[in-house]
Amino acid sequence: MTRWLKGAANAIGGGLFLTLFIVFIIQITARFGFNKPLPWTDEAAVILYIWAILWAAATVVPEREHVVFDLLWNSVGYRTRQVMQIVGNLLIGGLALVALPASWDYVHFMAREGSPVLGISFMWVFLPFVFLLIALVIRSAWAIRNAIRGIGLEAELRIQ
């Protein structure tokens, strides 16, 4: 089941990026090839960019691939890493959890407004931010669980 969900999330992310690329090519062709800029392509590109970035951050990019500053992490012992992992994820997950109701209220409130050209409800434009907050809460809870069990606390050399 997890493999299927991961594949579906990757397919949606890839579809968003592919659609963004196609809209971008249409925009370039119309603007520079035919000297007829299309207003809808600018708006669609911005909306697709928001969706692609927030969707990828919420579902596609694993935690180990996010940018980290691990100089301090690698210089402390096992117990300190465990405390750092728990406290850090309590902060991130807690803040996301606290922000979730107000963010949902705002996104839901934006349903009354539409984008100027395409008329897409702003609720649909900003909905992936709510997905990102939910993913942060779930990932943080999972990381706290793993830290309590002692999973993933080893120091590692990350070359980026």
Image (cartoon, rainbow, N blue to C red):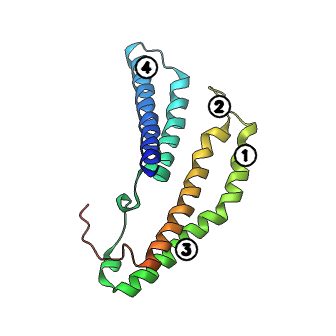
Quick one: SS at disc 1? helix
Q: Earlier in the sequence, mark 4 or mark 3?
A: 4
| Separation (CA) of disc 4 from disc 2 | 23 Å
**Relative to 92, 30 lies left or right:** left
Q: Identify residue for label 4.
A: 31
Q: Residues within 10 Å of mark 3 (few under 14, many from 20)?
A: some
**Relative to 89, 117 lies left or right:** right
Q: Earlier in the sequence, mark 4 or mark 1?
A: 4
Q: Which mark is residue 55?
A: none
Instruction: Residue type at mark 4: give it.
Output: Arg
Q: How crowded is mark 1: few (under 14 residues within 10 Å), some or many (20 or more)?
A: some
Q: Are the residues flagged by discs 4 and 1 in contact, CB closer than 8 Å?
A: no
Quick one: SS at disc 4? helix
Q: Identify residue for label 1.
A: 108
- Which label sits in the foreground, 4 or 3? 3
**Relative to 153, 37 lies left or right:** right
Q: Are the residues flagged by discs 4 and 3 in contact, CB closer than 8 Å?
A: no
Q: Earlier in the sequence, mark 3 or mark 1?
A: 3
- Which label sits in the foreground, 4 or 1? 1
Q: Quadrant of residue 33?
A: top left
Residue drawn at point x = 46 percent, y = 35 percent? 16
Up the image or down, 115 lies above or below 64; here it is above
Instruction: Residue type at mark 2: give it.
Output: Ile
Q: Identify residue for label 2.
A: 120
| Separation (CA) of disc 1 from disc 2 | 13 Å
Which quadrant: the C terminus?
Answer: bottom left
| Separation (CA) of disc 4 from disc 1 | 35 Å
Q: How crowded is mark 4: few (under 14 residues within 10 Å), some or many (20 or more)?
A: few
**Residue 39 x %, y %:** 55, 23
| Separation (CA) of disc 2 from disc 3 | 36 Å
Q: Identify residue for label 3.
A: 90
